[in-house]
């Protein structure tokens, strides 16, 4: 599990533990983290071989809106943090 490696999954009720807000997080990111009410887990692409026909099958899906908003906040904070270091 990711929690064993000290990278718990946001919103995981079993292994996620308490919410950990990164040092220097923006108010927007803190709000996104506090209001994200499910596991932050998404399969962008899935594939399998059909068990009866052996035909390769695959599906793609963009992250849902709430996860895209969370990712945007994380990216923004990361960019701002990198700019402060340079």
Image: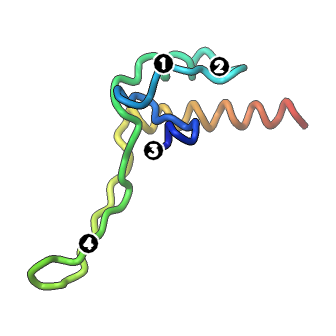
In percent of the image, x 57 and y 42: which residue is there?
5
**Does residue 17 appear to the left or right of 62 in the view shown?**
right
Residue linked to disc 2: 26
Q: Are marks 3 and 2 in contact (CB under 8 Å)?
A: no
- Residue at the location (36% across, 61% down)? 45
Question: Residues under labels 4 and 2: Cα distance?
Answer: 40 Å
State the SS at label 3: loop
Looking at the image, is mark 1 or mark 3 nearer the viewer?
Answer: 3
In the picture, the quarter occupied by the N terminus is top left
Q: Position of residue 86 (x, y in %)?
A: 90, 37
Q: Nearer the viewer, mark 1 or mark 4?
A: 1
Residue at the far left: name it: 52
Q: Quadrant of residue 12?
A: top left
Which residue is under mark 1? 18
- Mark 2, residues whose alpha carbon is within 10 Å: few (<14), some, or many (≥20)? some
**Which residue, given by chain and number where applicable, does mark 4 sit on?**
48
Q: Which residue is mark 3?
A: 1
Please state if 73 lies on the left or on the right of 46 as rendered: right
Q: Work out whether mark 2 precedes mark 1 in sequence or the reverse, and give the earlier one.
A: 1
Tell me the element at label 1.
loop
Left or right of 12? Residue 22 is right
Give the alpha-carbon distance from disc 1 to disc 3, as whole Å: 16 Å
Disc 1 packing (10 Å; few <14; some 14–19; many ≥20):
few
Q: Position of residue 72 (x, y in %)?
A: 54, 36
Element type where label 4 sits in the image: strand
Q: Which of marks 4 and 3 precedes in the sequence?
A: 3
The CA span between labels 3 and 2 is 28 Å
Q: CA distance from mark 1 to mark 4?
A: 35 Å
Q: Distance of mark 3 from mark 4, alpha carbons? A: 23 Å
Q: How many angstroms separate mark 2 from mark 1 (CA)?
A: 19 Å
């Amino acid at each position: 599990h990711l929690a064993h490696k000290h990278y718990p999954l946001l919103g995981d009720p079993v292994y996620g533990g308490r919410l950990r807000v990164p040092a220097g997080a923006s108010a927007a990111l803190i709000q996104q983290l506090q209001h994200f009410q499910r596991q932050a887990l998404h399969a962008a692409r899935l594939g399998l071989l059909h068990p009866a026909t052996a035909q390769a099958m695959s599906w793609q899906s963009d992250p849902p809106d709430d996860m895209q908003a969370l990712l945007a906040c994380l990216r923004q904070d990361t960019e701002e943090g990198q700019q402060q270091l340079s």
